[in-house]
């Protein structure tokens, strides 16, 4: 049994290749069924996101598995098999386990520490389980991967620092206003960046979100999505004093908020601070605004500097996470190796139980006066003796499973308990067969 990880991601393949291999919800079941039907596949799970299409599983033949997966991916995408192979990665054993753990912990993400991958990872396993395509090994692997993800996030700071422009803006706002819950927010512009910022702000529990846009209908749509209110663009300047936080993201070619506007705003607010984030290019807020006391203006370059610094910090934290990862990979490999010796341990225990049953039957046949409870007591005592005798050999077998040349040592152990050494029993069975034949 070999654990493998294969597929394409943002590191190995360009977006025009990845998008052709993306797995829509409607096609997931067919794809996992096709891969699971490959004779070499024992267990399988598929993770499909905007940055990766990856297949994790257990196989008994890596060459057949890779070839089969290439054929299936070629059929569903219409891409040439050789082209897919050019971008495909294929990892096994330690490297595969490590890769799966890195993905779950968002250490392999385009943005280190991003939280979305955790839900996507969990969802992929849920789908595989519903398809009955995963069993003991993959279940244990995914449980371990989720534990690794949690440990990395709680013991390091990879997800604590903002690495998106909109989220960095919110973090800066928190430094100016300790509590955002009583603050009014004004979004000027109703585009994608404004919507993303509105999501982050809404999550902090701000008092109210107002949206102003040249196209009033767009302002209404965005505001309603967050239980906010729309402000007509021509009323914008006179509404400014009501806003504690102003986020500007429009396509205007020149500033729409100037120094004289904000002087009036601060006067009406009686000196209460205003935080302005201008993520427009070109800038929509005059730079002179920053000269006014209690007006804090940040533009997109300021935010990028924050993001870049935070990204450096995340990368440092990721190095600490790698140490956790390596330790967890070793633990999982130890479990895997011990799993491989389970048949040997079962073989020995079955052998011991055969002897127990044979000897007890022989004993009870000569002691017919024993009642059921007495027989049960003797049976329990014999079982306890067997368990105590086999405890040390069992621990020894589990220990050697993690050492080099363990296969040879296991062969010696299996040879010790081979039925061929039961010469008396063999001779008895031969005599019995001869009598029956005569």
Image (cartoon, helix red, strand yellow):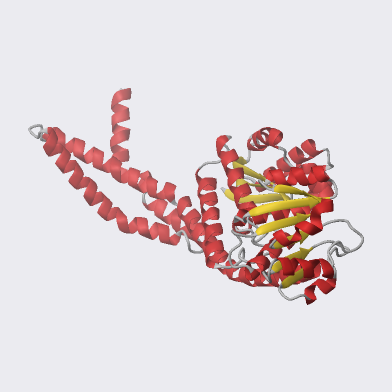
The residue sitting at 28% across, 26% down in the picture is: 435
The residue sitting at 44% across, 61% down in the picture is: 400
Asked where in the image residue 398 lies, by quadrant, the reply is bottom left
Q: How many marks?
A: 0
Farthest residue, direction top: 438
Task: Name the side, left or right, on which 419 lies relative to 61.
Answer: left
Question: Can I make out residue 389 in this image?
Answer: yes
Q: Is residue 51 above or below residue 289?
A: above
Q: Nearer the viewer, residue 423 or 104?
A: 104
How far from the left and from the top, in percent, is residue 335? 47, 56
Task: Name the side, left or right, on which 95 lies relative to 266.
Answer: left
Farthest residue, direction right: 253
Q: Which of 58 and 17 is in front in this view?
A: 17
How far from the left and from the top, in percent, is residue 3? 59, 50
The residue sitting at 27% across, 42% down in the picture is: 355
Task: Name the side, left or right, on which 315 lies relative to 290.
Answer: left
Q: In this view, does 278 lie above or below 19?
A: below
The residue sitting at 74% across, 46% down in the picture is: 222
Q: Nearer the viewer, residue 281 or 63?
A: 281
How far from the left and from the top, in percent, is residue 315? 67, 70
Question: Can I make out residue 422 in this image?
Answer: no
Quarter containing the C terminus: top left
How far from the left and from the top, in percent, is residue 395? 36, 58
């Amino acid at each position: 049994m070999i654990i493998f990880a294969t597929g394409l991601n943002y590191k190995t393949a360009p977006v025009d290749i990845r998008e052709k291999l993306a797995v829509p919800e409607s096609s997931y079941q067919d794809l996992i069924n096709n891969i699971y039907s490959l004779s070499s596949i024992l267990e399988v799970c598929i993770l499909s996101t905007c940055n990766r299409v990856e297949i994790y599983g257990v196989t008994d033949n890596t060459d057949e598995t890779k070839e089969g997966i290439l054929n299936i991916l070629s059929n569903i995408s219409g891409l040439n098999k050789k082209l897919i192979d050019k971008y495909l990665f294929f990892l096994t054993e330690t490297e595969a386990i490590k890769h799966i753990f890195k993905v779950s912990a968002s250490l392999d993400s385009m943005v280190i520490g991003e939280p979305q991958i955790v839900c996507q990872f969990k969802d992929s396993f849920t789908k595989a389980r519903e398809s009955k395509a995963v069993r003991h090994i993959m279940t244990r692997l995914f449980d371990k991967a989720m534990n690794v993800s949690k440990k990395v996030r709680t013991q390091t700071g990879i997800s604590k620092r903002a690495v998106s422009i909109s989220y960095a803006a919110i973090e800066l706002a928190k430094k100016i206003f300790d509590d955002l819950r009583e603050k009014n927010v004004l979004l000027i512009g109703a585009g994608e960046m404004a919507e993303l910022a509105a999501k982050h702000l809404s999550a902090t529990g701000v008092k109210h979100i107002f949206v102003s846009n040249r196209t009033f209908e767009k302002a209404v749509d965005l505001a309603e999505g967050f239980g906010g209110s729309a402000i007509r663009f021509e009323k914008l300047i006179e509404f400014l004093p009501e806003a504690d936080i102003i986020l500007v993201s429009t396509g205007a070619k020149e500033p729409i908020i100037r120094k004289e506007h904000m002087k009036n705003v601060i006067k009406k607010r009686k000196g209460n601070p205003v935080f302005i984030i201008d993520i427009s290019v070109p800038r929509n807020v005059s730079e002179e605004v920053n000269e006014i006391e209690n007006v804090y203006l940040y533009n997109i370059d300021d935010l990028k500097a924050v993001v870049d610094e935070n990204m450096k910090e995340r990368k440092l934290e990721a190095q600490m996470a790698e140490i956790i990862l390596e330790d967890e990979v070793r633990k999982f490999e130890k479990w895997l190796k011990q799993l491989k010796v389970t048949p040997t341990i079962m073989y020995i225990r079955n052998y011991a139980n055969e002897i127990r049953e044979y000897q007890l039957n022989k004993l009870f046949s000569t002691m017919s006066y024993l009642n059921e409870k007495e027989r049960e007591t003797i049976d329990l005592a014999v079982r306890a003796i067997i368990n105590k005798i086999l405890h040390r050999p069992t621990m020894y077998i589990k220990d050697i499973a993690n050492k080099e040349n363990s296969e040879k040592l296991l062969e010696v152990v299996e040879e010790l308990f081979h039925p061929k050494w039961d010469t008396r029993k063999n001779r008895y069975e031969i005599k019995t067969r001869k009598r029956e034949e005569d």
